[in-house]
Image: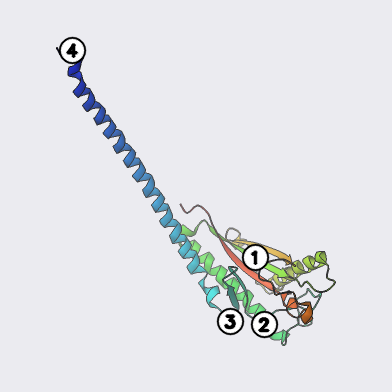
Amino acid sequence: MKSKSSGFFWPSFTDLMTSMFFIMLVLFVLSYARLKIKVDDLDRKLRVYNLVEENLKPIKSDTSLFRYEKEYKRFTLSFDVKFKTGMEILNEGTLDVPNPKLTLRRINEVGMKLKSIINDLYERRQADSSLSNVSYLLIISGYASDLENSSEFIEYQRSYNRAWNLWNHWKTRGIEFDDEKYKDLVDLQISGNGLGGLGRFKRDPENKFQNEAKNQRFIIQIVPKIGDTK
């Protein structure tokens, strides 16, 4: 004899399966929606990264003024700028290069090129809303040589002073990177790496420090800072 409750089994089972199917469908829709949002966000970020890379092409392509060190992801000047030992101020008498006047002229060209690139970055951001949260860290770094009997403290001061004097050299010629116009675009940093930093020339006391002396130089870095791409 059948139980009175046995007739309710199949309708109850059907309702349960229907409910489970509905729950699975909702979960699938939610998962798909979240995945699509993530894919769209990645697409936006990739587009912004590609735009940033495109915007920095002018400085990478100008090999007459800049040399890109791929290993360290930074720029150096493509020509020698070496100070005489202990010198910090940037003028013809303080540079240890064959033609100081030509070197100073090329340093001015570097400043003007950087200014034109930053102007271009500014105009592109004004024209493209997807770049509104993109800014750039512009670092002017000075280096120093680890020569015989050198003082680490003094060399760090000298390296900063060299970077500051380069910035001031450009500024007195109307080449300004911390102009009010660029306040949301360029974060200018003047730094001294002293006896540290990557990519230094090897210390060579057996060769009268000729290679080490080359470290009295500048490094220019432009680092993109990308915020919320939405």
Q: Which residue is identified by label 4?
A: 4
Amino acid type of disc 1?
Answer: Ile
- Closer to the chain start, of discs 4 and 1, is 4
Q: Give left or right: position of 129 versus 64.
A: left
Res 25 → quadrant: top left
Q: Residue at x 50, y 64 (%)?
A: 52
**SS class of the residue under badge 3?**
loop
**SS class of the residue under badge 4?**
helix
Labels 3, 4: front one: 4
- Closer to the chain start, of discs 1 and 3, is 3
Labels 2, 1: front one: 1
- Closer to the chain start, of discs 2 and 1, is 2
* Separation of residues labelled 4 and 2 (CA atoms): 103 Å
Q: Which residue is identified by label 2?
A: 105
- Closer to the chain start, of discs 4 and 2, is 4
Q: Which residue is identified by label 1?
A: 139
- Closer to the chain start, of discs 2 and 3, is 3
